[in-house]
Amino acid sequence: MCGIVGYIGSREAYPVIIKGLKRLEYRGYDSAGIALLNGGLKVYKKKDKVADLEESVIGKDISGTTGIGHTRWATHGEPSDRNAHPHVSNSGNIAMIHNGIIENYASIKNELIKKGYTFSSDTDTEVLLNFIEDIKKNNEGTLEEALRIALKRVVGAYCILLIDKNNPDTIIAARKGSPLVIGIGKNEHFLASDASPIIEYTKEVVYVNDYEIAIVHADELILKNLGNEKQTPFITKLDMELSAIEKGGYEHFMLKEIFEQPQTIYDCLRGRMNAETGVITMSGIQQYEQQIMNAGRIIIIACGTSWHAGLVAEYVFEELCRIPVEVEYASEFRYRNPVVNKGDVVIAISQSGETADTLVAIETAKEQGAIILGILNVVGSSIARKSHAGAYTHAGPEIGVASTKAFTAQLAVLIMVALKIAHAKNTINKERYLLLCKELMEIPDKVAIVLLQNNNIKALASKYKDAYDFLYLGRGYNFPVALEGALKLKEISYIHAEGYPAAEMKHGPIALVDEKLPVVFVATKDSYHQKIISNMQEIKARKGKVISIITEGDTVSPTLSDDIIIIPPADEIVAPMLSVIPLQLLAYYIGVAKDYDVDKPRNLAKSVTVE
Ligand code: F6R
């Protein structure tokens, strides 16, 4: 949520920052802005996308070797030029960008208004900035000192970058709760919300920790805590290539990421799963294997698509490991005074590893004695650092705002963990264990087969694109897939869609069914198949349009369906990794057919770092 970029060195800052903002645009895209130091302070900002900002600065002075830039997802104040970052302090000397929320901004603002400060935006950021300036003025101290004092009074989350007209050789940054990475170049530094703007210049980065302040010069990086004590920067080598964050010939990142899934699932399994011997090696969780085996309860905490992966995992863990599982929306868990017992195992699932609701929820569970395992995609992310242990999904950067490859990679990791624990606990027989290992290893090839249905699904999208509502139905392991299909459609095509357990339909939603309503059945061959056939009949009897995702060889479902998408046979435990693919493609092609920006759907942001 909000992307931040900064540069200090000997290059022109503008192109580095604009390119970086484009890479971070998935984090928010309702306005963008840039501040440059070149003798004076120049600030340009614009509502809408980074491309609009670029157009607005044509012919203007964009020189300068120090600068900061921002792409915004609005929290306080509507998207507009004046609410766009960077903001400039009342003196006109200091510019600041911010990702996060200052919760006590209203009381600080009142204090400042009494002192004569004026505000040209509705943002909490401008309040914090003038608060810092006021402290600097009163103490006659440095910007760094003023920032440190201000941050001790601030309640909320932030990653901020500050530049000062009177000190052009420095960028000052601070973080709490919102991510900040600093790339170390040769006599230059790059600052960003994630590594994607940095990767083409350097692979050496420092992940700044909460409550740290970074004083960044071209040739020096100083890290301090809020107590003004120097911290040693821990330099990490990025394990990511530039090609991973480019479109590679696809029209959209979302399509590229859908098509990457045979590879990303394979990358996730590779080196961990030996299907022949049945050995699963997961060094990240090895140390906690006993605790997971003995857990009285597993609590899965996540949001959105990751929450859907958690629902599949609930079925898998209960079936294979015989451990009770609860799946919680992170935002609800945090605020309802949950009961967490010592020895409970919490699994946090998150693509970004930065989702504020999930982060706060695991902190709550950790305080109460739970062991936290993170199933995360972004290496070094905030949730990764707050977890006791975990496993990365290795899906590579996911840039399309709608999550696709992260979901299937999360399922791959969760199923591996469940298999490993079930095997160790002896709650699965050897034959079934080996079969499931083999089934899992076959998934990448089977996903490639599902992707061959691309043109068929594109044609279905153009047939159904004008529907006003969709219903998605599934049972058992495919129920969360139905939820995920509905979420994808809502996000990308702005069509109202609901996911339901197929049997629940008769308790209410069936009233919606008429000849105009497309009903997507996730009806692969599993232990619920007979039952879902009956549900199809119920929809057909009411003239609904039935689109079914079915298993190759199923001769009954086609007779009850208006349209079918066939996927290869697979055990029901791994089948969601296949049945979700057509739903991702359907949502994608309907969004494209409606001419929407599928990579940047309205009102959304990739990384939701506000609660
Ligand atoms: C759906 C989507 C969101 C995220 C949710 C959690 O396509 O992208 O629903 O799944 O915001 O994000 P992470 O997994 O980063 O915690």
Image (tube, rainbow, N blue to C red):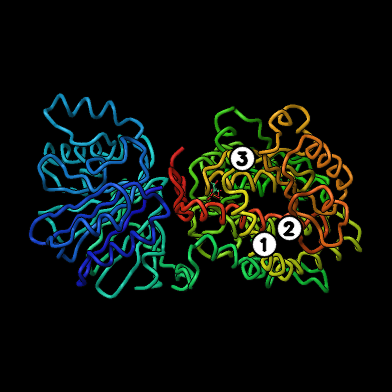
Q: Residue drawn 52% across and 49% down? A: 492
Give the percent coordinates (x, y) of residue 560: 82, 47
Q: Quadrant of residue 420?
A: bottom right
Give the percent coordinates (x, y) of residue 163: 19, 53
Any atom of ligand 1 within 8 Å of the CB at mark 3? no
How many marks do you count on the picture?
Answer: 3
Could you tell me which secondary element the residue under label 2 belongs to? strand
Kindly tell me whether residue 524 is visible in this rendering.
Answer: yes
Q: On the image, numbered disc 3 is attached to which residue?
A: 497
Q: Residue drawn 58% across and 47% down? A: 489
Q: Is residue 37 left or right of residue 397?
A: left
Give the percent coordinates (x, y) of residue 252: 48, 62
**Separation (CA) of disc 3 from disc 1:** 21 Å
Disc on res. 25: none
Q: Is residue 161 left or right of residue 456?
A: left
Could you tell me which secondary element the residue under label 1 belongs to? helix
Front residue of 45/530: it is 530
Give the percent coordinates (x, y) of residue 546: 74, 45
Could you tell me which secondary element the residue under label 3 belongs to? strand
Q: On the image, numbered disc 1 is attached to which residue?
A: 456
Mark 1 residue type: Asn
Which badge, 2 or 1, is on the more N-terminal residue? Answer: 1
Mark 3 residue type: Ala
Q: Is residue 184 left or right of residue 168?
A: right
Kindly tell me whether residue 223 is visible in this rendering.
Answer: no
| Marks 2 and 1 in Cβ contact (< 8 Å) | yes
Tag nearer the camera, 2 or 1: 1
Q: On the image, numbered disc 2 is attached to which residue?
A: 565
Location of residue 181 with respect to 328 vertically, above or below: below
Which badge, 3 or 2, is on the more N-terminal residue? Answer: 3
Other-residue count near label 1 (Cα within 10 Å), few / some / many at <14 / 14–19 / ≥20: some
Mark 2 residue type: Ile
